[in-house]
Amino acid sequence: MFRILTVFFLVAQVFVFSLPVFADQVVLKNGDRLTGKIIKKDDEKITIETEAAGKIAIKWEAVETIAADGEL
C-alpha cells in the first residue's frame, strides 16, 4: 500500500509541475523579456505587472513583440 501511495504522489508531482504557466510576456528590442500581466496599454506605453519588479511602464519604441494569454 505504501508503495502505491508513493508512486501516486510522485506521478501527481510530475503532473502539477509540468502544467504550463500562463502569463503575458513582453520582449524588448534589446532582448530582455518581462513576464507578468499586462495591465494597461495606450498610444505611448504598455504597462506590465511582474511578480519580482512590480509595475513597469515601457515605451512602445522599445517593444519587439508581445505574447498575451488573452485579448489586450
Image (tube, grey):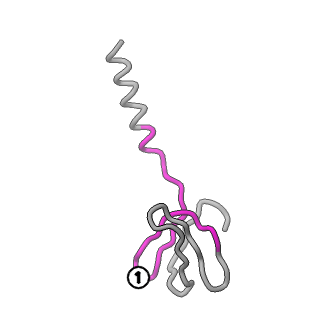
Residue 23 shown in magenta: yes
Q: Which image quadrant for residue 70?
A: bottom right
Question: How many numbered badges does the structure rendering display?
Answer: 1
| Residue 70 is one of the magenta-drawn residues | no
Magenta stretch bounds: 15-40
Instruction: Give the residue at the far top of this rendering.
Output: 1
Please, what secondary structure does the residue beneath circle 1 have? loop
Location of the C terminus (image quadrant): bottom right
Which of the pair 52/34 is nearer the observer?
A: 52
Query: Residue 20 placed where, x, y %?
Result: 48, 50
Q: Residue at x 42, y 43 (%)?
A: 17
Side of 15 relative to 39 (left or right): left
Q: Tell me what residue is drawn at x 48 percent, y 65 percent.
A: 35
How far across and how far down the image is residue 62, in percent?
A: 50, 84
Residue 42 at what x, y percent from top left?
67, 80
Q: Position of residue 5 (x, y in %)?
A: 38, 20
* Residue marked by disc 1: 30
Quadrant, the N terminus: top left
Vertical relation: 14 (above or below) 47? above
Residue located at (46% from left, 68% from top): 53
Residue appearing at x 55%, y 84% in the figure: 59
Q: Which amino acid does label 1 sit on?
A: Asn
* 43 relative position to 11: left or right: right
Q: Nearer the viewer, residue 51 or 3?
A: 51
